[in-house]
Amino acid sequence: MLQEAESIATCAPLHASDTTPPSCELVIGGKPTGQRLEGCILEAALKCDAGYLLFLTDDIPHEDSLNIHLVGFSGALEDSARIGGMYSTGRFEKLQMQQPDKVSFRFIGDTTWTVQVLQKPGFRIPFLSEPAGVHRPLGFKRRFAITGTPRREPH
């Protein structure tokens, strides 16, 4: 069941450089965990059966991305994904929990995105299992699924 997590914060933001994306340190219950996560502005933190589902933006004007992380209760990173692309930007808004394990929100592409936390790790095919604009680290497992159909801007 998803619910707001009030014990989550971030600290020590590192802004993007030519070689590294923006990141911050995860803080659980007032204690820094040592876990650095991509993104520097915590938009939302939700508690679920698997841990915490976190939404962080990069704070890069005209090219902001949304980083979604699932971390265990100890702070260990379980899964990550990024929504965004070159020259695209968005505002994280209209977060709505759809019990028991889904949340929807608006971000880029005039799109309502949905994240569903999976009860157990699910199989994924790299480069094929995600909607346009969603990027994940290389791997065959995921702990949450993302759906959405961003519209393409006319050129």
Image (tube, helix red, strand yellow):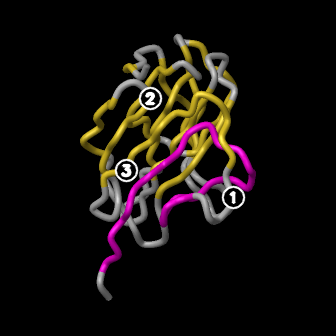
Quadrant location of the N terminus in the rendered image: top left
* Residue for badge 2: 101
* Residue for badge 1: 125
Residue type of the residue flagged with mark 3 = Trp
Please tell me how crowded label 2 is: few (under 14), some (14-19), or many (20+) other residues with Cα within 10 Å.
some
* Residue for badge 3: 113
Measured along the vertical axis of the image, is residue 66 above or below residue 72? Answer: below
Residue type of the residue flagged with mark 2 = Asp
Quadrant location of the C terminus in the rendered image: bottom left
Q: Are marks 1 and 2 in contact (CB under 8 Å)?
A: no
How far, Cα to Cα, is label 2 from label 3? Answer: 14 Å
Looking at the image, which residue is at 75% across and 51% down? 139
Q: Secondary structure at mark 1?
A: loop
In the orientation shown, which residue stands out farthest toward the left?
Answer: 94
Q: Are marks 2 and 3 in contact (CB under 8 Å)?
A: no
Q: Position of residue 8 (x, y in %)?
A: 48, 20
How far, Cα to Cα, is label 1 from label 2? Answer: 22 Å
Quadrant location of residue 138? bottom right
Looking at the image, which residue is at 32% across and 44% down? 105
Q: Could you tell whether 93 is left or right of 36 in the image?
A: left
Identify the magenta region: 130-153
Viewer-nearest residue: 10 or 86: 86
How far, Cα to Cα, is label 3 from label 1? Answer: 20 Å
Q: Is residue 131 magenta?
A: yes
In the orientation shown, which residue stands out farthest toward the bottom?
Answer: 155
Q: Could you tell whether 146 is left or right of 96 in the image?
A: right
Q: Mark 1 vs mark 2: which is more N-terminal? A: 2
Viewer-nearest residue: 122 or 85: 122
